[in-house]
Amino acid sequence: MTILDTTLRDGEQTPGVSFTLEQKIEIAHQLSDIGVDVIEAGFPASSDVEFETVRRICAEEGIRPKICGLARSVKADVDRCIEAGVDMVHVFIPTSEIQRTYTIKKSHAEVLAITREIITYARSKCDIVMFSPMDATRTKPSELIEVCKAADEAGVTIINIPDTVGVSTPSMMKPLVAMIRENVKCRIDVHCHNDFGLATANTIAAVEGGADQIQVTVNGIGERAGNADLAQTVMILKSIYGMETNIQTEKLVETSRLVSRFSRIAVLPVQPVVGDNAFSHESGIHSHGVMANPGTFEPGIMMPEMVGHRRRLKLGKHVGKHAVRQMLEDVNVNPSDPELDMIVAKVKEISGRGRKVTEFDLFEIAKSITGSHNDKKMIELDDISVFTGSHAIPTASVRVVVHGENKTCSRTGDGPVDAAMKALLAIAPGKVQLKSFQIEAISGGSDALGCVTIEVEDEKGRIFDAAASNSDIVIASAEAMVNALNVVYRSGGFDR
């Protein structure tokens, strides 16, 4: 099964998303690294900027997949793709009655003639040509078969079946693809939209019907509600169907985070496969189960390491004693059974008020209940100052005490908070990455008390969270980072 990724073309058509040239090249390299077979890089005829972007990606060293360019069924569009240097030309034409009538004002007979002509022309220019009967799932079956046969007879390499407005269902998609499979000799591809949340399911159904290649996007971004999601589709094929692809699945999470950062579209915690909660457990029953055997409350056929994730026990009002004891034992805190009951009750009481309880909070709660004072902090914030302005580069200077030694550091950033985070991370005696940052106002007015919650990842790939509150967001952010670094230290990080 081959994978065509259209994040750089259909994905960028997500309302509000616009990748820079540099971002597109970085995404293309990442897609190459994870093993996609084809990258649809853009629509060269749509603008000079788009043409240059596709041309640069085609010329970029180190990108392994074939590069595809989109074209209307117009010779000039095909020429523009060839000039950009693509390996594959993807031509399309509307075939449903509503599309023919209102977008191109052509009859079915005219569509057949144009299809034969454009594919013959494209094949004279390029060895690999893909054809899409746009809005295939709303096209009369007899007319769809006719246009697919015409494309096949004209020498097309691949026929793509698009569910352009996401109205198909798996029970419709499988026989549709099977019907086309019986009538053409070329390879079949499928491109599904997610208007009803069925894009991934329809893509899998198309594979059951005989599709040879699937089109996906990272994080499922794309027009309207998006497309079939790369990570979900690949892992369904691999883990449930036992089908092989060239995707290095352990890089799926990092790919998701890269595209999330560039698109400025956050990945929901509950997003399958790559979301933060995909392998996280809070419920006492669930946590106890996965501690004994991960297969109890996880699929089993898909482990977190397979996609570049980590299993995490989370704190909340549903947390159980086994999870809390394990989290404390990991940092050498061993409460008695009565103390453990009190710690769990306190965690649940705080969570019940709607507040997130972080690992740092847990350790502070445990310290207050057990009376333990053997948790000397690795790092303490002594002072922080920031310089910023509408015509100045934001700069932060921090003074901290690390293992009893005074240290200072200054860094610039995109803002005072970013600069402060960079300064503290530079002082840390080991590599730590900031994975997420969230600010929440917990009181009203311009003097609102802000709560900053962050997650960091250490060199071992472990993720820890911490929080801090202050009326000054920069100070709250710095204190949250210091708290997080101390959690990493308590958990055996920094070569302790």
Image (cartoon, rainbow, N blue to C red):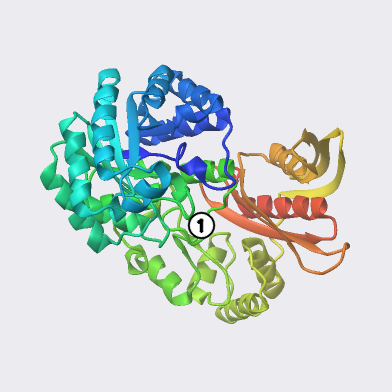
Quarter assignment of residue 295:
bottom left
In the rendered image of this protein, does residue 456 appear above or below residue 314?
above
How packed mark 1 is, by other alpha carbons closer than 10 Å (few <14, some 14-19, many 20 or more), is: some
* Residue shown at the point (49%, 31%) measured from the top left: 46
Quarter assignment of residue 487:
bottom right
Q: How many marks?
A: 1
Q: Looking at this view, is 64 or 496 the one in front?
A: 64
* Residue shown at the point (41%, 48%) measured from the top left: 102
Q: Looking at this view, is 108 or 363 the one in front?
A: 108
What's the residue type where badge 1 is placed?
Asp
- Left or right position of 385 against 4: right
**Can residue 352 be seen by looking at this rendering?**
yes
- Left or right position of 463 against 306: right
**Can residue 242 be seen by looking at this rendering?**
no
Residue 491 placed where, x, y %?
Answer: 58, 54
Q: In what quadrant of the picture does the N terminus appear?
A: top left
Q: Which residue is mark 1?
A: 276
Residue 342 placed where, x, y %?
Answer: 63, 80
Q: Looking at this view, is 200 or 107 the one in front?
A: 107
Residue 8 placed where, x, y %?
Answer: 47, 36
* Residue shown at the point (28%, 36%) measured from the top left: 131
Numbered disc 1: secondary structure:
loop
Residue 365 placed where, x, y %?
Answer: 68, 70
* Residue shown at the point (61%, 80%) measured from the top left: 345
Q: List the single residue furthest toward the left.
A: 182
- Left or right position of 337 against 201: right
